[in-house]
Image (cartoon, rainbow, N blue to C red):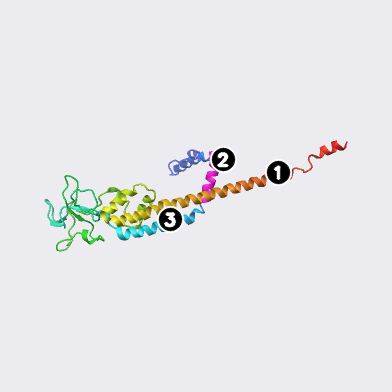
Amino acid sequence: ALISFIPRMEDSGLGFLRLFRILRPLRSLKQVPQMKVLVDTIISSIPRLANVTIMMFFFFWIFGIVGINILDGIFYHACRIKPAPELVTPPNASSPCWEWTHTGDERLCGGRYMCEAPPDGVKKGFCGGLEDDPNKDVRPVFEGGRRGYEWCPESEPKKTFPETDFIHFDHMGGALLTVFQCMTMEGWTDIMYYVQDGFGFWVATIYFFLLIPITSFFLLNLALAVVDEARDDFDNVEDDSADEKSSMEDGNESPGGDPMEHLVELE
């Protein structure tokens, strides 16, 4: 609040310091003993979670590497009207371009699905992907070579689903994000179905049925076990402190009672 009284401070870019006002409700933790215990438990468990975090990144890295090696580029697979691109010259164009039109089938191909059963109103097609796709069967074959010509509009390989711009196995960052989302069990079945259509049923099933138990069940429960252990240790420390305080209070009391009482008895 004092920032508003400083001249020209509002325009200096330090107004964001007001965001720290949201920390004021934390004062109420002192008034709620159970909440204070919970926060202290979480803070004390942070150092113990370091090993769990290292193990988590290890498994993330392993599944990410496997995904990149076998699932790279599958989200670019799409059904095409023709088996290979054709060199055409569109109207009002100065140079030819490669045309490879999509059928409009909104489903990945190259694995379990090969464009053989499109929905109503969509023609059967041929599966196609990137030029450097690991699966040679879906690579575009340019008659006479690429020869430096560009793709025609709406013919360049692109991803069918917008969410796969972030959830994919094209590089390590996207692979780690995909593994993390699957660990949260949010939409992991959709990703598995995509991979089954674009790569293969059994590989995708085995990959995700190993990924989910190890990351979601094992690692998350391991982290909860560490927090629970920290809570038990915190409770034991509090009990020991209470016992020590109680024993000190008992030791301060005289074993013979009040000395004035003895004087009264002697009289």
x, y percent for residue 156: 21, 54
Mark closest to the chain's N terminus, 1 or 3: 3
Residue extending farthest to the bottom is 144
Judge whether residue 41 is colored magenta. yes
Q: Amino acid at mark 2?
A: Pro
x, y percent for residue 265: 85, 37
Residue 161 in sight here: yes
Query: Is 260 drawn above or below residue 247 in the view shown?
Result: above
Question: Badge 2: few (under 14), some or many (20 or more) residues near its Cα, within 10 Å?
Answer: few
Depth check: give the residue in front, 265 or 7. 265
Location of residue 199 by image quarter: bottom left
Question: Badge 3: few (under 14), some or many (20 or more) residues near its Cα, within 10 Å?
Answer: some
| SS under mark 1 | helix
Residue at 28%, 55% in the rendered image: 201
User: What residue is shown with label 2?
Assistant: 33
User: What residue is shown with label 1?
Assistant: 249
Q: Amino acid at mark 3?
A: Met
Per the model, the C-alpha gap separating discs 3 and 2 is 33 Å
Q: Are marks 1 and 2 in contact (CB under 8 Å)?
A: no
**Majority secondary structure in the magenta region:** helix
Per the model, the C-alpha gap separating discs 1 and 2 is 23 Å
Mark closest to the chain's N terminus, 3 or 2: 2
User: Residue 56 has which mark?
Assistant: 3
Depth check: give the residue in front, 119 or 77. 119
Residue at 34%, 49% in the rendered image: 188
Question: Badge 1: few (under 14), some or many (20 or more) residues near its Cα, within 10 Å?
Answer: few
Q: Amino acid at mark 1?
A: Glu
x, y percent for residue 119: 19, 46
> Which residues are the magenta region?
27-45
| SS under mark 3 | helix
